[in-house]
Image: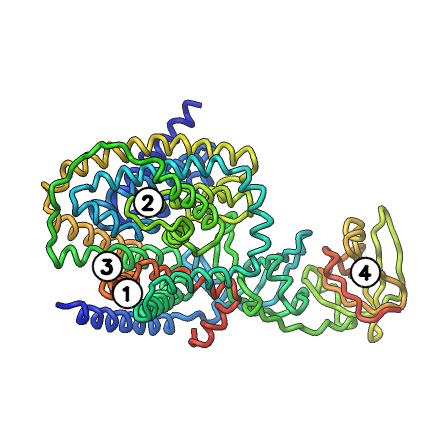
Amino acid sequence: MLELLIYILAGVGLGVVTGLIPVLHTNNLTPFFVALAAGSSLVSLNIAALIVAMSITNVFISYIPSTFLGAPEEGTELSVLPAHRLLLEGRGYRAVRLTTLGCLGGLLLSAAVLLPFLAVATPAYELIRPQMHWLLIFVVLLMIALERSWTGAAWATVIFLLSGMLGLLALDTNFIRGDAALMPLLSGLFGASVLLPSIVGGSALPEQHAENEPLDMRANAKPLCAGTAAGAITGIIPGVGPSQGTVLAQLATRSSGTDEFLVAVSGVNTSKTLFSFVALYAIGKARSGAAVAVGEIMEVGCTELVFLVGVALLAGGIAAVLELKLGKLAAKHIEKMPYRALCIAVLVFIVALTVYYSGLAGLLVLATATAIGSLPAVTGVKRTHAMGVIMLPCVLYFAGLNGSVLSALGL
Amino acid sequence: MDDKTITRLGIICSLTGLAAIYAGALSTRPRITPIASLDNGFIDLNVVISGHVVDFRRHEEGHIFLKLCDDSGGVVSVPIFSRLNAELGESIELLDVMEVTGEVVLYQGDLEVVPDQAGDVKVVHTPPMKLSSLSGENAGIPVKVQGTIVEREIVGNGNIILTLQEDGGQLSTFIPYWITDNGLPELHVGTMVRVDGWLQLYDGKLELRVVDASHLHLVEAA
């Protein structure tokens, strides 16, 4: 038991590191643990616990850099604007508190609805699996239609297609290895493109207030529930990320406020992370890099699932406290730090990591993704359309057109 | 710089980048890779391989596990999972020539090429060998033969020995008892069958050993 606890705490520690360092993702570390499990006598269950703890903690902690540095990771991209709005009002810590509430609430609610989810997940997945491409197309069209103006919808379509084409070329050809492509793609679309305006504009942060007034639980209950439900759905449907899940949750609850948004998006994110492990048992599919790793380490049955959910809850409890502590620390010191230099340092780190993981081909992907990622802000449409980078390849894959499209392109 | 200029710049950079990546992808598109050259450096990459089917196992859940061997002398596993198998329009037999496009993955320490969709698998059926051309020197190699059953005998625990005849040549075919209950077609004297298996010498006599029920195909009923 003590040994298991040490593994979980190690996972939490690694989750803090991967969460605090923008761009560094748990997926960068999981192959090491899979190899460790295969090549050593270490107990597989302990290593799986470490991966789950790391994965859950990473979701909580990644909201600190995405709030204070504006360098979001996969899944936090849509929350950039609302969190930055609060940051520029000197209320960055409030954004951290709201996302802590969303993450923890989403995790608890997900664990609570696990049994009914298991009852419906398998038949629901079997039902939608043959129609998955239509479902994804519906989500894409809905996102575009929500732009509310013809110009906005046109730009949304252009951004979706450009990012989709980039995803297809980077993920489905031999130009770059599939796993090495994801990092420059997402870092460019949702990281570097957000940092550049801060660097060029030379923005400075106002004084941050570590306010402690109670959060309105009643007002946040609705987005939390909707976020959890959206997380459960996106946990089994590939290609649909937390951003799309949040927009669906907002549509369902008809909420558009900053607080509700942050609670919903963070709820979607932890819920999706937990359900990606549940999907291993429910539908036999891994829906995240961490879930793939756990699936490779051990067979997930009913007992293992209960164990993994227990680990997630324990890690989530610790991560919530850590997010608040670290968030307060960040709020206290961020204004004293040279913000522009910090953003430049993060950008340099993104470039260096891209070259290290993906080589020069990755650098070209990063540059193209950054150019596409800069379009939503200047054209005034939602950044989530750039998720076409994953969604378009997914639509083509489920429609069975992947090979035909690549052949038509001469690839 | 105003938003309009940034938008234009963004579009130009995006399209230039996409064009460069497209050109890069074109230059790295997979051509037929010699199987012997596959190593860990290929993991996660898509390759095209072409070779003879030298091993063929059917899993009870509908998956097919093949091994392909090409002129380079390399052998690699090709799993065709049930979903894809159901979409394939044709049967695969031992010694057929296949061209497979798929991702190289490492599974339990061995490299596999995993096709993803029906279009990734092309099969060219090879003709069966003439029975009269077979001799003891061929022992140990996989062959595909076709002939009419002229004798059927049950020995031991339920093993079946068929004697096939074609073009004046004859060959004994040994079907072990553990596969006789596993989807084996009705076999009667006078039935023409096509059989894949390994040649072996038994008591100095050349014999074809069948290892899976799916290696036996009815050509013409008696």
Give the residue pinned by disc 3: A193
Position of residue A288 in the picture relative to residue A398 (left or right): left
The chain letter for the residue carrying disc 4 is: B
Figure quadrant of residue A385: bottom left
Tell me how far mark 1 sits from mark 4, CA to CA: 59 Å
For the point 33% across and 63% down, the residue is A147
- Looking at the image, residue B99 sits to the left or right of residue B26; the answer is right
Circle 4 sits on which residue?
B185
The answer, for residue B14, to whether it is visible in the render is yes
Which mark's residue is nearer the viewer, 1 or 2? Answer: 2
x and y percent of residue A245 in the render?
41, 51
Give the residue type at disc 3.
Ser
Residue A368 or residue B127, whichever sits in front: A368
Mark 2 Cα shell of 10 Å, populated few (<14), some (14-19), many (≥20): many
Residue nearest the viewer, comparing A131 with B162: A131
- Chain for numbered disc 3: A
User: SS at mark 1?
Assistant: helix
List the residue tagged with mark 1. A372
What's the residue type where badge 2 is placed?
Glu
* Dot 4 amino acid type: Pro
